[in-house]
Image (spheres, rainbow, N blue to C red):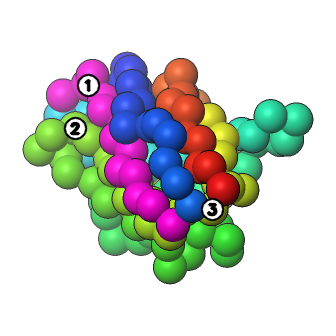
């Protein structure tokens, strides 16, 4: 089974950029998983951010991050990235990645059976 570990979070000013990484422990099976990023701000529900299909032929973005965030995968490194540009204070949250076997990049968290612990992103105004 895949084990996911996020990294790359931190403190950044409004308008800045961060690149998150979601590294998987599994070997060749990583390429069989769709990977998504979700986030949860204090007092809020978990919300979908972005996803990439297991075969990489589809990406899916939440409306409020499209054009600012880019999700990509490198199966050779068992890693999915989330490049976040033009960050806003409302992007502040704990960002978690999740895996869905042979998934197409759904936005619903119920599709994802494996979750990482998360990494904190804080955007100062």
Q: Is residue 64 magenta?
A: no
In the drawing, does residue 42 fall left or right of residue 112? right
Specify start and end residues of the magenta stretch as a single range. 15-27
Distance Cα–Cα, label 3 vs label 2:
29 Å
Mark 1 neighbour class, 10 Å CA radius: few under 14, some 14 to 19, many 20 or more: few
Where residue 8 sits, quadrant-wise, is: top left
Furthest-right residue in this view: 43
* N-terminal-most mark, 3 or 2: 2
- Dot 2 falls on a residue whose secondary structure is loop
Where residue 91 sits, quadrant-wise, is: bottom right
- Which residue is under mark 3? 88
**Residue at the image point whose x is 56% and y is 61% from the top:** 14
**Residue at the image point whose x is 41% and y is 59% from the top:** 17
- Dot 1 falls on a residue whose secondary structure is loop
Say which of 9 and 100 sits in front.
9
In the drawing, does residue 80 fall left or right of residue 10? left
Q: Is residue 108 above or below residue 84?
A: above
- Which residue is under mark 2? 78
- Which residue is under mark 1? 26
Mark 2 neighbour class, 10 Å CA radius: few under 14, some 14 to 19, many 20 or more: some
* N-terminal-most mark, 1 or 2: 1
* N-terminal-most mark, 3 or 1: 1
- Dot 3 falls on a residue whose secondary structure is loop
Report x, y in % for residue 61.
56, 68
**Residue at the image point whose x is 26% and y is 41% from the top:** 79
Say which of 120 and 117 sits in front.
120
Quarter of the image where the N terminus is located = top left
Q: Is residue 49 visible?
A: yes
**Residue at the image point whose x is 49% and y is 48% from the top:** 12
Q: Is residue 111 visible?
A: no
Distance Cα–Cα, label 3 vs label 1:
34 Å
Q: Are marks 3 and 1 in contact (CB under 8 Å)?
A: no
């Amino acid at each position: 089974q895949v084990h996911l570990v996020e990294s790359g979070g931190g403190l950044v000013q409004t308008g800045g950029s961060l690149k998150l990484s979601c590294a998987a422990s599994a070997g060749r099976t990583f390429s069989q998983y769709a990977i998504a990023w979700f986030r949860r701000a204090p007092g809020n529900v978990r919300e979908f951010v972005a996803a990439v299909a297991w075969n990489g032929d589809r990406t899916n973005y939440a409306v409020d991050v499209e054009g600012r965030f880019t999700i990509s995968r490198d199966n050779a490194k068992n890693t999915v990235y989330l490049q976040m540009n033009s960050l806003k204070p409302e992007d502040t949250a704990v960002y978690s990645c999740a895996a869905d076997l042979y998934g197409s990049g759904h936005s619903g968290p119920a599709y994802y059976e494996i979750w990482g612990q998360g990494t904190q992103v804080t955007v100062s105004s």
